[in-house]
Image (spheres, helix red, strand yellow):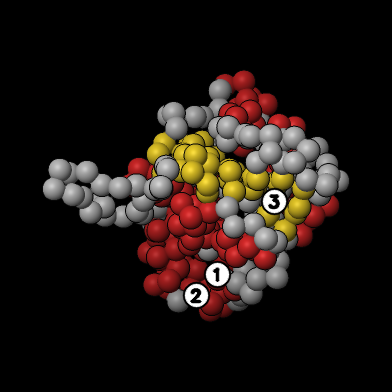
Amino acid sequence: MPMDYHNPVLLNDTVEGLNIKEDGVYVDVTFGGGGHSRKILESLGPKGRLIAFDQDKDALLNTIDDPRFLLINENFRHVKRFLRFHGIKSVDGVLADFGVSSHQFDEADRGFSIRFDAQLDMRMNQQDVLSAYSLVNTYEEEELKRVFWQYGELRTSPALAKTIVAARAEKAIETTFELKAVLNKYLPQGRENKILAQIYQAIRIEVNQEIEVLKAFLLQMPELLNNGGRLSVISYHSLEDRLVKRFIRNGLFEGEPEKDVFGNFDVPLKKVGGLIVPDAKEIKLNNRARSAKLRIAEKLNSD
């Protein structure tokens, strides 16, 4: 495994949260550099099995030579369907790390990072049609405003959208630095990188449909997990974490569940422990871990 591909965040806590059984079946839906997967395999016996997903073809270079391991080059939003294709109807644990990998940030031509001038891209799966370039240059002003507000939580969303539409009428915005130049007046000195990161985050989430993928993934967990099966999820921004927290708490993304006459309601999962975040030592070793939040849940007995 290329050591610079991705430094796995909260490695021990995330894998320990799965409460691994030696002969169990587990899924790592965000394989990346394979750090979490390798840790899971260390705890599995000869009859155990691990299936991993990653839609980024670059991740295939990190595949693990182990008869207990299978890597599927697909988006995990359809995890249940692909597992059934391989004869697996239920599993004992699922791990998800929703962060963009260090490799994707560090590969300049992928267009994920504010540090490099590159073609606007930001696609996790480079076969997808929608890219950052097409979003920036074709979305209507109202759509752009929605993206910046909904996924970047930027109060300047209307102005950002209007400025982009005006600029692209003169010339297509092709690179990350061109976009930065167009929006420069909304990047206050001292907070430039923070605001720019929020803008890039919003575009990336829309391009990769990350919120829709997360929702689709979580909705499959109650049926996919065996009774007592565990879910370990690492999120990196409040949009993701709120959805994970709410789904674990009441099985919904918004609103409140229907209660019986005693005020009780049924939920498919129960949280295990509290919120886990990296300690100062891990953040010092891996600055990208600073915003990570780990939540663990268990499938309740449905019998």
Disc 3 and disc 1 in contact, CB within 8 angstroms: no
Q: Is residue 264 left or right of residue 79?
A: left
Disc 1 and disc 2 in contact, CB within 8 angstroms: yes
Disc 2 and disc 3 in contact, CB within 8 angstroms: no
Single out the mark in the foreground, 2 or 3: 3
Look at 70% across and 61% down and name the residue there. 86
* Amino acid type at mark 1: Val
Query: In this figure, which residue is indicated by the disc labeled 1?
Result: 136
Is 89 placed above or below 2 here?
below
The kind of secondary structure element at disc 3 is strand
The kind of secondary structure element at disc 2 is loop
Q: Is residue 101 left or right of residue 142?
A: right
Single out the mark in the foreground, 3 or 1: 3
Query: In this figure, which residue is indicated by the disc labeled 2?
Result: 139
Query: For mark 3, does the 10 Å Cα neighbourhood hold few (<14), some (14 to 19), or many (20 or more) residues?
Result: many
Residue sitting at the far right: 65
* Amino acid type at mark 3: Ala
- In space, the residues marked 2 and 3 are separated at their CA atoms by 34 Å
Between disc 3 and disc 1, whose residue precedes?
A: 3
Q: Is residue 25 left or right of residue 207?
A: right
Look at 59% across and 48% down and name the residue there. 91
- For the N terminus, the image quarter is top right
Look at 36% across and 54% down and name the residue there. 253
Query: In this figure, which residue is indicated by the disc labeled 3?
Result: 52
Q: How many marks?
A: 3
Is 221 placed above or below 5 here?
below
* Amino acid type at mark 2: Tyr
- In space, the residues marked 1 and 2 are separated at their CA atoms by 6 Å
